[in-house]
Amino acid sequence: MTILLSITFMLGGIMTCMENKALVIVDVQNDFMSWGSLPVDGAEHVIPKINELQDQYSHIIITQDWHPEDHSSFKTTWPVHCVANTKGAECVDELDTHKAQLIVRKGFRQHIDSYSAFYENDHTTTTGLHGYLQQLGITDLDFVGVAYDYCVAWSATDAAKLGYNVTVIKNACASIGSVEEATDKMRQMGIIVNE
Ligand code: VGL
Ligand code: ZN
């Protein structure tokens, strides 16, 4: 009886923990793959890992970079990528999306870029994601996807600033620049970076 009760409590604990936690899959879109316009090294190779991880979560959120065709970042910083309603902006076919409950699109205002899933790069305009998570009682967020040093890092950093317990699963991410630099910055913010 005692053993049965302990097991029940333990399972209860694990379930509660799953209920409070969400996986955020960042920008697994065609344009960031080797066949896209802004390829991130190794990006397509993390997709099987992301699919496998999804079994462990009861809340899954996907983000998409979603730009107008004349987005300001195309003149200053990046090649044309993730234009709304194009194949390049679609999630990669191999990504399992059936468990995703919410898709957050960001970067659709012509004059502001948005790396973070929470705030655009003016650090003020919100995507609404924080309100959604608060209403579901989610306190813990795990991040995977691309690019590790841009949209993943910026999203994870904003999440930490907003008070979430944040983990970035590094081997389920692909980076544009230095992995070490991005890892150091995130760890300084109290983010857990798993090998
Ligand atoms: C991203 C550069 C430009 C990203 C988006 O998803 O990390 N990087 N737009
Ligand atoms: Zn972009």
Image: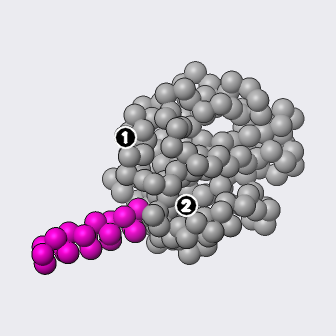
Which disc, if any, is residue 156?
2
Mark 2 / mark 1, whichever is N-terminal: 1
Q: Residue furthest top?
A: 35
| Residue that sits furthest to the bottom in the current view | 2
Q: In x, y percent, where is residue 82?
A: 71, 34
Q: Residue 176 is drawn in which quadrant? A: top right
Where does the image place residue 79, in percent across and percent down from the top left? 73, 32
Mark 2: amino acid:
Ala
Most frequent secondary structure within the magenta stretch = helix
Q: Nearer the viewer, residue 1 or 69?
A: 1
Question: Which mark, residue 124?
Answer: none
Q: Please, what secondary structure does the residue beneath circle 2 have?
A: helix
Whether ligand 1 has any atom under 8 Å from the Cβ at mark 2 is answered as: no
Residue 67 to residue 169: above or below: above
| Horizontal arrangement in the rendering, residue 23 relative to residue 55 (left or right) | right
195 vs 47, nearest the viewer: 47
Few, some or many residues within 10 Å of mark 1 (<14, 14–19, 20+): few
Is the residue 167 above or below the residue 146 in the image?
A: below
Residue on which disc 1 sits: 52
Mark count: 2
- 12 in magenta: yes
Three-letter amino acid code at the position of disc 1: Glu
Q: Is residue 184 visible?
A: no
Residue 47 falls within the magenta-colored stretch: no
Q: Which residues are magenta?
A: 1-18
Ligand 1 within 8 Å, label 1 CB:
no
Image side of residue 132 versus residue 23, left or right: right
Residue 90 rendering spot, x and y as whole percentages: 65, 30
